[in-house]
Amino acid sequence: MIPPLVDRGPGRPALGQTLGQTLGALAAFAAGLLLALMIAQNGALARATDPWLGSWLAHGVGTLVAALLWWLSPRPPTPEAAPPWAWLGGLPGALTVVLAALCLNSSLGMAGTLALLLLGQLLFGALCDGLGWLGLARRRPSGKDALAALLVMAGALLIVLG
């Protein structure tokens, strides 16, 4: 988080905190756009080959890009700092690529696939927050969180069943 730059008075966040939150929200939005692009590309690969080979190809390109970015960027903390389960992060990634490609190439299409992906992410994220799973700080979901989940669920159902 960016440290506070300007104190805006009692009860109001400092300008730096607001800027940090805005940049974080924009980065999350950009990641969502990239996720949709990735799913479309992986779906095309799966149609041209099969979902498993499409996943291998996508992860091969991803490995090369990640290696280049790692080589160009400052080094993160030592690998010993990562918990053992974190080393298996590629497993859900590979399964996500295959499952999303299968769904994209079904009657769900892009919008239905993304709607259900978002719903799954939101519900699992709320569960992880509420229970403190995966090393996250425990955060009790609020009524607004529940309302947001219900609205996303309703939207997903409208898209899928619509």
Image (cartoon, helix red, strand yellow):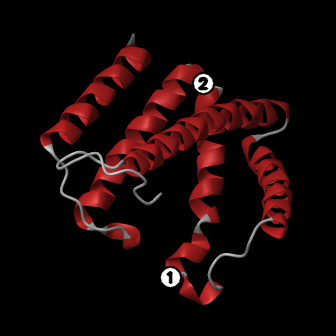
Q: Secondary structure at mark 2?
A: loop
**Taking 12 as reference, is 43 left or right?**
right
Residue drawn at x 74%, y 37% as measured from the top left = 42
Precedes in sequence: disc 2 or disc 1: 1
Mark 2, residues whose alpha carbon is within 10 Å: few (<14), some, or many (≥20)?
Answer: few
**Disc count in the image?**
2
At 53% from the left and 36% from the top, the residue drawn is 29
Q: Which residue is mark 1?
A: 83
Residue type pointed to by label 1: Pro
Q: In this view of the protein, which residue sits in the foreground, 136 or 89?
A: 136
The structure residue drawn at horizontal position 53% and vertical position 83%, both measured from the top left corner, is 84
In the image, farthest residue toward the top:
162
SS of the residue under disc 1: loop
Q: Position of residue 24 (x, y in %)?
A: 49, 46
The part of the image, by quadrant, that contains residue 65 is bottom right
Image coords of residue 135 (percent x, y): 39, 73
Measuring from the top left, give residue 121's x and y in whole percent: 42, 45
- Establish if 86 lies above or below 157: below
Furthest residue in direction bottom, as rendered: 80
Q: Is residue 111 above or below residue 35?
A: above
Residue at the spot of label 2: 106
Residue at horizontal 29%, vertical 48%?
13
Indicate the amino acid at tag 2: Ser
> Could you say where residue 48 lies in the image, as x and y percent from the top left?
85, 31
